């Protein structure tokens, strides 16, 4: 338990050891599940809880504050890393009401079997007085789920946006101190969690942009006591501008695709284009996601296996397709022995991306002079496309 401001406390938990979220997303730096207590002159509110694996930490922190009762548990988001301890807290504080919107209420009933009479349902923009402190609630749908909302503590001008602006970063620091470290963690978080909802995020940024915000206290990672740091980063990430960069993600089984990747990579570098190359044999998915936040072009490289793409390249395509980056162009390079549908399969897997596909380069067996010439032409085309949109 730590005091952020007078009568505002951080009571969440640090999860130093967690290495995977949703059994999919790597967490190389662990994470935190932030929960906050706002103590008003009349009432006390707990904003979010923690992952159920850390319920004991939250309950110890609350007990150490010595409140006989907590009046409100504000639930911003039904995902269990924030809501999972609500049943334990409701048992500890039998008078407490869960404050949330109607969508989140329905989800908490479905996911955690919270009883109907434990809720106080609020609407977008509604306020709740704690005496000398006032909570105002705003719906921020799709950041991260459709029910997500945030709280603005009016007197202190603190925004509690739950997942929005968060970072998976286990740290004992309450506030952002090492900005480059937090920037990388927040960008990873944006790429993995937020990027699919880019247009919703833009709208929600406009909505919260009307508030005067002195501090942003998210539900993962450190608190931003200089909010412009993360607001500027988000403006950049959700904006439509892309960078003169190519993400080159590939698998090679017998070196044919690798030789093509290396040739294309050199050709792009010679043309002044930044290359972010990922051998998918052992790639941190988060690093690939981060690279996709800004890159103008993605090129997938794959051999042909059992008539299709190598499953690891197909997996990368599936992930990129789900993350919906603002990438503008795509192509495919690779090889085959006797035939197959590798190109059609990978193109189909990228269907969500609004990309212009530049003609793929596929070699029969080892790449030969004409294949290398085709890769040079592909590099020329990528450069021309980047020039066309004014980034090269
Ligand atoms: Fe941190 Fe969408 O939960």
Image (cartoon, rainbow, N blue to C red):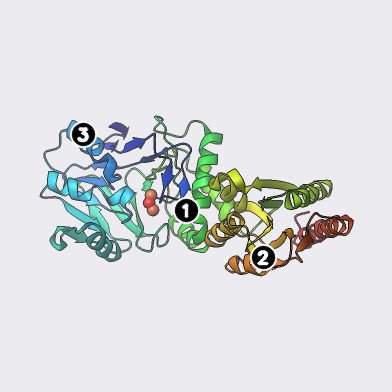
Residue tagged 1: 193
- Could you say which is closer to the camera, residue 316 or residue 253? 253
Quadrant for the N terminus in the image: top left
Give the residue displayed 25% in from the left and 42% down from the top.
38
Residue 299 drawn above or below residue 228: below
CB atoms at circles 2 and 3 under 8 Å apart? no
SS for tag 1?
A: helix
Who comes first in sequence, dot 1 or dot 2?
1
Q: Residue 342 has which mark?
A: 2
Label 2 environment density (alpha carbons within 10 Å; few <14, some 14–19, many ≥20)? many
Q: Nearer the viewer, mark 2 or mark 3?
A: 2
> How far apart in space, not on screen, are marks 2 and 3 (Cα)?
55 Å
Find residue 236 and report its horizontal and vertical position in percent. 59, 51
Find residue 149 and report its horizontal and vertical position in percent. 35, 57
- Could you say which is closer to the camera, residue 365 or residue 113? 365
Label 1 lies in ligand 1 vicinity (Cβ under 8 Å): yes
Find residue 363 and report its horizontal and vertical position in percent. 79, 60
Give the residue displayed 63% in from the left and 52% down from the top.
294
Residue 154 drawn above or below residue 7: below
CB atoms at circles 1 and 2 under 8 Å apart? no
- Could you say which is closer to the camera, residue 235 or residue 51? 51
Q: Is residue 125 left or right of residue 276?
A: left
Q: Nearer the viewer, mark 1 or mark 2?
A: 2
> How far apart in space, not on screen, are marks 1 and 3 (Cα)?
30 Å
Residue tagged 3: 60
Q: Is residue 155 left or right of residue 348?
A: left
Task: Count numbered badges in the picture.
Answer: 3
């Amino acid at each position: 338990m730590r005091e952020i401001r007078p009568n505002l406390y951080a009571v969440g938990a640090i999860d130093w050891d967690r290495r995977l979220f949703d059994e999919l997303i790597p967490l190389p730096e662990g994470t935190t599940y932030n929960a906050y207590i706002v103590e008003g002159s009349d009432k006390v509110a707990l904003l979010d809880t923690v992952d159920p694996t850390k319920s004991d930490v939250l309950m110890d922190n609350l007990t150490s504050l010595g409140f006989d009762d907590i009046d409100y548990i504000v639930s911003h988001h039904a995902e269990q890393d924030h809501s999972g301890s609500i049943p334990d807290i409701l048992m500890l504080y039998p008078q407490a009401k869960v404050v949330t919107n109607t969508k989140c209420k329905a989800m908490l009933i479905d996911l955690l079997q919270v009883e109907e009479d434990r809720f106080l349902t609020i609407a977008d923009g509604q306020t709740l007085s704690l005496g000398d402190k006032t909570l105002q609630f705003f719906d921020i749908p799709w950041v991260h789920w459709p029910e997500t909302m945030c709280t603005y503590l009016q007197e202190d001008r603190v925004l509690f946006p739950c997942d929005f602006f968060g970072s998976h970063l286990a740290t004992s620091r309450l506030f952002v101190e090492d900005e480059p470290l937090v920037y990388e963690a927040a960008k990873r978080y944006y790429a993995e969690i937020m990027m699919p909802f880019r247009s919703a995020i833009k709208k929600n940024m406009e909505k919260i942009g009307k508030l005067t915000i002195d501090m942003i206290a998210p539900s993962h990672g450190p608190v931003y006591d200089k909010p412009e740091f993360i607001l500027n980063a988000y403006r950049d990430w959700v904006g439509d501008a892309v960078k003169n960069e190519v993400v080159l993600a590939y698998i090679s089984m017998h070196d044919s695709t690798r030789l093509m990747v290396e040739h294309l990579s050199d050709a792009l570098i010679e043309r002044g284009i930044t290359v972010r190359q990922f051998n998918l044999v052992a790639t941190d998915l988060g690093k690939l996601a981060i690279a996709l936040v800004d890159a103008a072009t993605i090129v997938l490289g794959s051999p042909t296996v059992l008539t299709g793409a190598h499953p690891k390249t197909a997996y990368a395509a599936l992930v990129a397709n789900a993350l919906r980056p603002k990438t503008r162009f795509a192509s495919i390079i690779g090889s085959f022995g006797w035939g197959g549908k590798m190109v059609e399969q990978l193109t189909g897997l990228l269907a969500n991306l609004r990309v212009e596909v530049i003609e793929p380069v596929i070699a029969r067996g080892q790449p030969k002079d004409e294949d290398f010439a085709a890769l040079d032409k592909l590099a020329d085309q990528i450069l021309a496309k980047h020039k066309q949109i004014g980034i090269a």
